[in-house]
Amino acid sequence: MLMKDTISLTMIVKDEQAHLAACLDRVQDQVDEIIIVDTGSSDDTLEIAQRYTPHVFSYQWNGDFSAARNYAISKASCAWIFYLDADEILLSETGNLKEIIQQHEGSEAFLLPLENPTVDASSYVNRFFVLRLFKNKESYRFFGIIHEQVSVQDAGSAQIVQGPILRHRIPPISLRNKKRARNLNLLKRALIQDPQNPFLHYYLGLEWLMLSKPEKSLPYLRTAYEMLTDENLLIKAPALRSLVICLKNLGKLEEALILCLDADLKYPEFTDIYFLGGTLLAEKGEFTLAIKWLKQAIECGEPPAIYSHMLGTESFLSHYYLGYCCDMLGDVETARRHYETAIELNADYTFPLANLFLNLRLSKGFLSAYNYFCDKGYFHNLKFSLILAEEFFYAGYPNLAKEILQRHVFELESKAKSSLNQAFYSLGWYSLCAGEPKKARDLLGKIPPESEFYSKGQVKIVFCLLLSGYYKEAKDQILNLWKQEELRAEVYLMLRLIKLLQNGDMNFLPQTIRDRELKTIGLAWFKEMLSFQSQVTWQPQFSHFMRSLQTLLLNLSSQSTLELINLIGQKRKEAEASFNYKFGEKMI
C-alpha cells in the first residue's frame, strides 16, 4: 500500500552532468524518493545520479518520451509523482509540494508555474502552468512521443497553484539547436500519425519560431490557433502570443494587429495582447496609439493563471516601451520617468539604460548624463556600470568609461565572477584604447580560462603586443590560440597581419578559410581600432598597424574593399556629428 502524502521524484536523463546535481540539490528535501532513468548517457550523469539515490535505472531509448517517463513511474513506490527535467530547478523558497497536497485534499493533480526564459537575457521570461504533481494511479500516465502530457480523466480533479515555481535553464545555443532538431524530427513523425492534433501543430510552430524560422513556423501556429478551443486556453493563449510574434517577425504587422484587436474582445484579461499590440503600433510609428495599448497592459495587471504570461508585460516591459514612445514624440521628461520606473521594477532588466543614456545625452549633454547616473547611484551597480561605461566609451568619452569601472576595482573580488571577468575585459580594452597596453595586458591577463571572456581577452592581448611592436611574442600568443577551434579564423588572419607588419609580405599562407568569415573579422577589428584615442592614433606604431590592416582588407576581396570604404565614410560622419555636438550649439 502506498504511504499517504509521500512523493516520488521521477526523471529521465541523458548526458546531463552539467545540470543534474543543481537540480537534485534544490528538490531532494521536498520528496521521499528519487527515481532516475538514464536513456544512454556517455558522460558522468550516472555517477552523479547515484550520489543522490540508489534508484537509478537504464532504459533503451526508442524515441518515445512518454514510454520512458511511464517506465520511471513504474519504479516509483510513493503515493504521488512529481517529475522534473534535469535542466530545471525547483525554487523551494516559493512553495512546498507536501503543503500543496495537504491544503487540497480532494485534488489528484496540480499544475505548477514553470518559468521559461525566451532569450539569453533573463528578463524575458514566459510563465506557463504545467501538470507536474499527480497521484500515482494507473489513470495518470503520459501519452505522446514528444512534448508528452499526462492523461487526466477528470479535469475538475486538477488544481492550478502559484508555487513552488519551477525554472528552466537556458542551455548553450549549440545544445539548444541540437535538441530542437531532435524535437522537430519527432514532432514531424507524430504529426504524420495524428495530423489533426493541434498540440503537435503548436509545438512544431514553436520549435521553428525558436530557431528563427518564422516562415516555417507560421502555417503550424495558424493551424494550432484555429483548431484549439477555449477549453485548451493553457495552450491556446501561448499559441496566440507566438502567432502574433511570428507575424511581427515576418513584417506582417497589420495581420498581427488584427489578431490583437480580435483577442482584446475575446480575452480582455490577457495582458500580453495589449503589450504586443503596443509594440506593433510603436513599430508602425503610431506612438500615441501605442501608448494607450501599453498603459492598458499596465492597468490590466498580471493575468489569471490560465493564461501563459510573459512576465513584465504588466510592469517593466511596458514602461520601457512607453519610454521609447514618449522619446519618439519628443516628451523626453516623461520618457525618462518610464525608463527609471522600468529599472526600479526590475533591476535585472538593463535595456532601458542605453535609452536613458541617449535621452540624457541629447537633451542635457554628456556631463549632465554622467552626473545624473552618479546621483541615481547607478554606478554602484557593477552590471549597470558595465553597460553605461560602454555607452560613454563608444560615444567618444573613454576616460569617463574607465572612471566608471575603476570605481569597482577595489571591490571586484566580491562581485559575481561573470561580472568581474567582464569588468576586467572592458577595463583592459578601454586601457588599450587610451594608449596603456601594459596596463591592458595586466587586466586582460586576470581573466581565467573558464570564463566566457577569456578568448576575447586573449585576442585583445595580441593587439596589445602588436601595437607595442612585439611581433615575436604576438606570434607565440597567436599560435597558442590555435588550440581553440572557435578562434582559428582570427588566428589565421592575425598570422597574415603579422607578415604585413614585419616586412610587408603579401605572400600569405594558403587560403583555407572562407573569405566572408575573414572579411567580417577584419572589418570588426578595423572598426574597433577607430575607437582609439587621438593621442594613440598619432603614434607611428598605431599608424603602421592601421595601414597594414587596411592593406590586408583591400586584398581579401572586392567586397571587403567596398565595405571598408563604407565603414570609413560612416565613421567620418559620426566623428563630424560628435564634433558638432561637443563644440557646436549643445556644449557640455
Image (cartoon, helix red, strand yellow):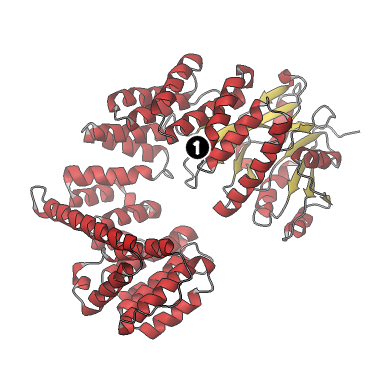
Q: Could you tell me residue 413's position as x and y percent?
A: 45, 64
Residue in the image at 29% along x and 72% along y: 551
Rendering quarter of residue 394: bottom left
Rendering quarter of residue 68: top right
Identify which residue, 523 or 94, lies in the foreground.
523
Picture layout, residue 281 above or below residue 18: above
- Give the residue at mark 1: 214
Identify which residue, 45 or 543, lies in the foreground.
543
Rendering quarter of residue 106: top right
| Residue closest to the far front | 558
The crowding category of the residue bearing disc 1, from other C-alpha atoms within 10 Å (few below 14, some 14 to 19, many at least 20), is: many
Please indicate whether residue 302 sits to the left or right of residue 558 in the image.
right
Q: Could you tell me residue 368's position as x and y percent?
A: 19, 48
Please indicate whether residue 455 sits to the left or right of residue 337 in the image.
right
The quadrant of the rendering that contains the N terminus is top right
Please indicate whether residue 348 sits to the left or right of residue 306 in the image.
left
Residue 372 in sight: yes
Type of the residue with mark 1 = Pro
